[in-house]
Image: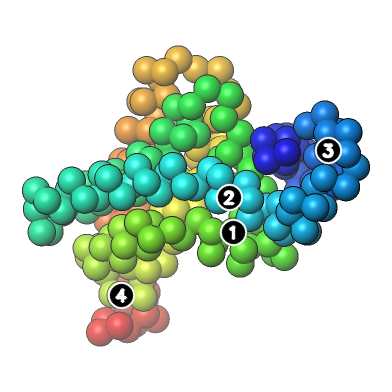
Amino acid sequence: MIEAAECLVAEHGMTALTFRDVQDRAGQLNKSAAKYHFGSREGLIKAVLEERMAPVDARRRLILDELLADSEKPTLRQLVETHIHPLAEHTLLRTDSRYARFLVQALFDPKLAEIIWKQVEAESFRQVTDMIVATIPAPAGLARLRADQILTHVIVTLATWEAKPRSRSQSRVLVSDLVETSLSIAHADVSPAITTFFGADQ
């Protein structure tokens, strides 16, 4: 049912996510099964996120641990790659993935955004994000904003390409470019006005 829920949201939007449709898509004959297992629509969404984010978080944790073993101060590029590659491996580089499209649909639903952010922000994600913020050459408030912009850019880009035909090598090129464009966001010029807005000492 988790896979059925992910498919429905990815292909038809969040409004398509009903227990009845999930059960029909999953071929579940017990009409109370979804309610029994997940309790609510929000519970089903959390289940999808937990199922998909666990391997992403584990992979990111492994990469980060290896990175920190080699250097106490990873470069911004290394941190951005650590941020992007695990999610790309489980979306763009995974056959028949719909998870990035699911994330986009859920992330921009006002009623569900808080649930999504809590689930997406796993321990390794928070640590890498904090390190990215500390490394971006900008006032702290602006650095945090740019880290959030990078996440949005990554998810939307992965979702855009997830359903398009491409070879694995082409997917890797897209991921490489995603790293470059994310670094461009981090390194964008800081105007005097935006410095004043966020405060140079934030």
Instruction: Decide: is 6 above or below 163.
Output: below
The CA span between labels 2 and 3 is 18 Å
Q: Name the residue rendered at 73%, 38% in the picture.
A: 1
Sequence-first tag of 4 and 1: 1
Per the image, label 1 sits on a secondary structure element best described as helix
Q: Residues within 10 Å of mark 1 (few under 14, many from 20)?
A: many
Please rate how many residues cluster around mark 3, counting C-alpha atoms within 10 Å: few if below 14, some from 14 to 19, many from 20: many
Q: How far, Cα to Cα, is label 1 from label 2? A: 8 Å
Element under disc 2: helix
In the image, residue 27 sits, relative to residue 167, either above or below, namely below
Left or right of 79 in this view: 71: left
Q: Earlier in the sequence, mark 1 or mark 2?
A: 2
In the image, taking residue 144 as reference, residue 114 lies left or right, namely right
| Tag 1–tag 2 contact (CB < 8 Å) | yes
Pick whichever of labels 4 and 3 is earlier in the sequence: 3
Instruction: Identify the mark at residue 116; answer none if there is no mark.
Output: 1
Q: Given the image, on which type of amino acid does mark 1 rest?
A: Ile
- For marks 1 and 3, give the one nearer the viewer: 3
Q: Nearer the viewer, mark 4 or mark 3?
A: 3
Tag shown at residue 23: 3
Residue 39 on image: x %, y %:
77, 58
Q: Which residue is mark 2?
A: 49
